[in-house]
Amino acid sequence: MDKEKLMGLISSYSGRELEQRKSWYSPAAEAYNQARPSYPQAVIEQVIEIAQLSRESKLLEVGCGPGTATLSFAALKCPMLCLEPNPDFYRLAVNNCQNYSQIELQNTSFEEWDLQAEQFDAVVAASSFHWIPAEVGYQKAAQALKPGGSLILLWNKELQPSQAVHQHFSRIYAAHAPELDRYEDKPTQLKILDNLGQIALDSGHFDKISPGYVEVSVIHTAEQYLTLLQTYSPYLKLESQRRDALFQELRGYIERHLDGRLPLSHLSAFHIAQKR
């Protein structure tokens, strides 16, 4: 996916009305909390080292969701202010983070949050920054950072089956939702990640991008895989009858031809950009 196409896709999310963005994931909040992958410890350790984070650091997390990445940084025991506009995600985050007194959660959007200028050592966004209009997000993140502070963008790319399995899945998608028949191999995911880093640089508020990634492999049952799929935006938009028929056939293939065990892989990545 080239940068222009990627920017168009991002605009299709960030360009929605704020109230629609706030409630977008509500139908799948519980599934998201259950099925979305966490960020590998190897990624978190690299981020902490490159951004020079410590117990004395102060972090702002933008769009924390149910706390998927929040808990990974909680081990630092540094103060964290985490913003989450979706009320269902916020409720889950409060529950998931209840054992960490240094984490403050606010049920608000980044756009509506009252700026605390130059108060944070790092601004963290885990698979969330593309939901904020670029002209707002990058500037406000830079304003919130102390001089020399870091914008930390974490990305878990979509989990993918092998290309051979995807070829069988394609026939199922063709029958029920051909518009969702999309496959990302490793070079494709790396290209998307490169473009995401370039978009951050193009904002004019950051430089010295430090990228990195790890490859992750997992095995899902049919139920786990279908729960994961329903948390992705294109599936949330899909009419329920079509989605049910698609999922029924995918489930049948996984159980009959793969003994109920579906190997998946993806890239878990980061960009660390220093405030200009």
Image: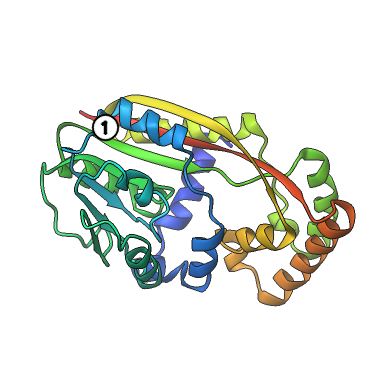
Left or right of 174 on screen, residue 111: left
Query: Which residue is denoted by mark 1 in the rendering?
Result: 204
The answer to which image quadrant residue 83 occupies is bottom left
Residue 8 in picture, x, y percent from top left: 49, 47
What percent of the width, then of the height, locates residue 158?
59, 47
Hey, which residue is sitting farthest top in the picture? 208
- The answer to whether 211 is drawn above or below residue 22 in the figure is above
Q: Nearer the viewer, residue 256 or 152?
A: 256
> Which residue, as the protein is rendered here, is positioned at the far bottom?
241
Picture coordinates of residue 96 (x, y %)?
Answer: 38, 62
- Residue displayed at 49% across by 62% down: 33
Horizontal relation, residue 1 to residue 83: left or right: right
Q: Quadrant of the N terminus?
A: top right
Q: Secondary structure at mark 1?
A: loop
Residue nearest the viewer, comparing 47 with 197: 47
Expressed as whole percent of the image width and height from the top left, the position of residue 142 reads 20, 40
Q: Left or right: where does residue 180 sit relative to residue 245?
A: left
Q: Quadrant of residue 81?
A: bottom left
Q: Residues within 10 Å of mark 1 (few under 14, many from 20)?
A: few
Work out whether residue 246 can be spotted.
yes
User: Which quadrant is home to the C terminus?
Assistant: top left
The type of residue carrying mark 1 is: Gly
Rendered residue at 30%/60% (across/down): 99
